[in-house]
Each structure stands twice: as structure tokens, then as C-alpha cells.
Image (tube, grey):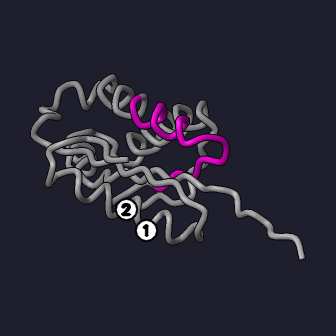
Amino acid sequence: MVNHLHKAHTFFVANIQWLDCVSQTTSNQNQWWTHLKSILESTLHTYHGRVSQYSEHEIVVHFFDSPKDAVNAAIDFLNTLNSIPPLQKTDVNSFRLGIGIHTGKSSRSDISSIAKQLAQRTSDYEVSIII
């Protein structure tokens, strides 16, 4: 019998719940969210990430090629958010965007679950990214 190695999966989970507060200050919330998602998906796509889940609380991205892609995407994700005009007018330091990144060879749901837990813990350590 051949022992098949499972391919490692990398997940990036970002807590984006606070963006809803910012969207409420814009005149057209649906248009703002559509624009924001378009910009973020473009940024994540650059690093071969595929959005696997969007909710009003979080974005879950699956990276197929390299964990480094997830780290680079997280950095660009934060930089992209800082360049969006409605966010430039907001004290983004008063909000904490948490990004958790986890890589493993177990099931995708286990890996993304751990990444979610890491994203939630960013506020405990006052950091934006935990790997």
C-alpha cells in the first residue's frame, strides 16, 4: 500500500466585523461593501488566495500554494484597508482587525477553525496578525 501524504492547506481568517460600523457612515452601504469586497478579493487573488467564506463578521481565504502567500496577503490586506477613503477618515487604531493564519495537513475545516481562533486572539496580544 502506498502512503499518500495529504497536501498542506493554509487558511487566512480576518475578523472584519468592525468594517460594518464604518460602512454605516457611507451614503450607500451596499455599493461600499461591493467596492470593498472587489478590492480585497483582487488583493487576495494576487497571492493565489480564494475566498471560501464571507460573512458580516469574517472573511475566510484558502491558499493553495504557499503559507508565505497567506502572510504576504495579510500584510497587503491591512495596507489595502488603510488606503480605502472611508477608512482613511476613521480612526482605524480604535478598531482591531484580527487576522489568523494556520497551515496544516489535517482537514480543511480543522485548519480554518484554528485560524479563526488565532484571529480572535489577536486582541488579547494587541497585534493584527497571528501565525
Tell me what residue is drawn at x 26 percent, y 41 percent: 128
Mark 2: secondary structure = helix
Marking on residue 113: 1
Mark 1: secondary structure = helix
Left or right of 98: which side holds 37? right
Left or right of 65: which side holds 131? left
Expressed as whole percent of the image width and height from the top left, the position of residue 45 reads 60, 36
Residues at discs 2 and 1 in contact (Cβ within 8 Å): yes
Residues shaded magenta = 60-75
Expressed as whole percent of the image width and height from the top left, the position of residue 2 reads 87, 70
* Tag 1: amino acid: Ser
Q: Which residue sits furthest front? A: 1
Q: With respect to residue 9, does 77 lie above or below?
A: above
Q: Which residue sits furthest right? A: 1
Which residue matches tag 2?
116
> Foreground residue, 62 or 125?
125
